[in-house]
Image (tube, rainbow, N blue to C red):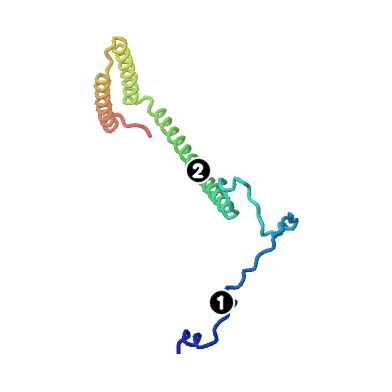
Amino acid sequence: MSYAAAAASGPSQSAEEKRAPVIPELEHTDSPSTSSLIDVDTESVHTVPSDFSSQPIKTETQRDRVEHEAEVIEERAKKAYAESKAKAEKAEKEAKAKAKKAKSNLEANKDNPVYIGNAVAVVALSAGLGFGAYRKYAAGDLTWKVVGAWTGIVGLFAAGDYYLSQYLFKNKYPPKK
């Protein structure tokens, strides 16, 4: 037997029973209430400023994360600074040592004719190129083609001077160490 058949075989409901029960209503009062439903003195209630949604950091967790990231970045920056300072000091020491070695090398070989010839050639070539470039500039004939051609000539002269100097250092005038 189904539930519908069992319910149909029982006594029928009265008209009052067929109606839905009345929904209870709240009592309406027009007087302002001085009591609040929320206890504002409790820790669970927080108020936020009106510009809360435009703030970059909204929670304590975000603030803690940002502070932690700032500490990590600061530590990395200090480490990188210390490393770069150490590298700079090392490079400075190496440069001073190299300059001192070059100076002592020049002092030891100041009477070597290859060193003297190279110094004279550099001075003469620089003066000649400077004077010639000024004359071309004053005449309005200094172009990039002229500069390029003379740069090539200087390069050829430098290569020839290097190989000649190496030959003379090995065979006739060895440098002093």
Q: Look at the image and tell me in which quarter the N terminus lies.
A: bottom left
Viewer-nearest of discs 1 and 2: 1
> Residue shown at 74%/58% (left/top)?
35
Q: Look at the image and tell me in which quarter the C terminus lies.
A: top left
Badge 2: few (under 14), some or many (20 or more) residues near its Cα, within 10 Å? few
Mark 2, residue position: 86
> Residue shown at 28%/15% (left/top)?
142
Identified by mark 1, the residue type is Lys
Asked if the residues shown at circle 1 and circle 2 are in contact, with their CB atoms under 8 angstroms apart, the answer is no
> Residue shown at 57%/74% (left/top)?
19
Q: In which image quadrant can residue 130 be found?
A: top left
In the rendered image, the vertical position of residue 126 relative to residue 29, given as above or below: above
Identified by mark 2, the residue type is Ala
136 lies left or right of 33: left
In the rendered image, the vertical position of residue 125 relative to residue 10, given as above or below: above
13 lies left or right of 28: left
Q: Position of residue 12 (x, y in %)?
A: 54, 84
Mark sitting on residue 31 = none
Mark 1, residue position: 18
Mark 1 and mark 2: span between their CA atoms? 94 Å
In the rendered image, the vertical position of residue 95 relative to residue 120, given as above or below: below
- Pick the residue in front: 169 or 99: 99
13 lies left or right of 116: right
> Residue shown at 60%/73% (left/top)?
21
Secondary element at tag 1: helix
Secondary element at tag 2: helix
Task: Mark 1 or mark 2: name the one nearer the start of the chain.
Answer: 1
- Pick the residue in front: 135 or 14: 14
Q: Position of residue 30 (x, y in %)?
A: 72, 55
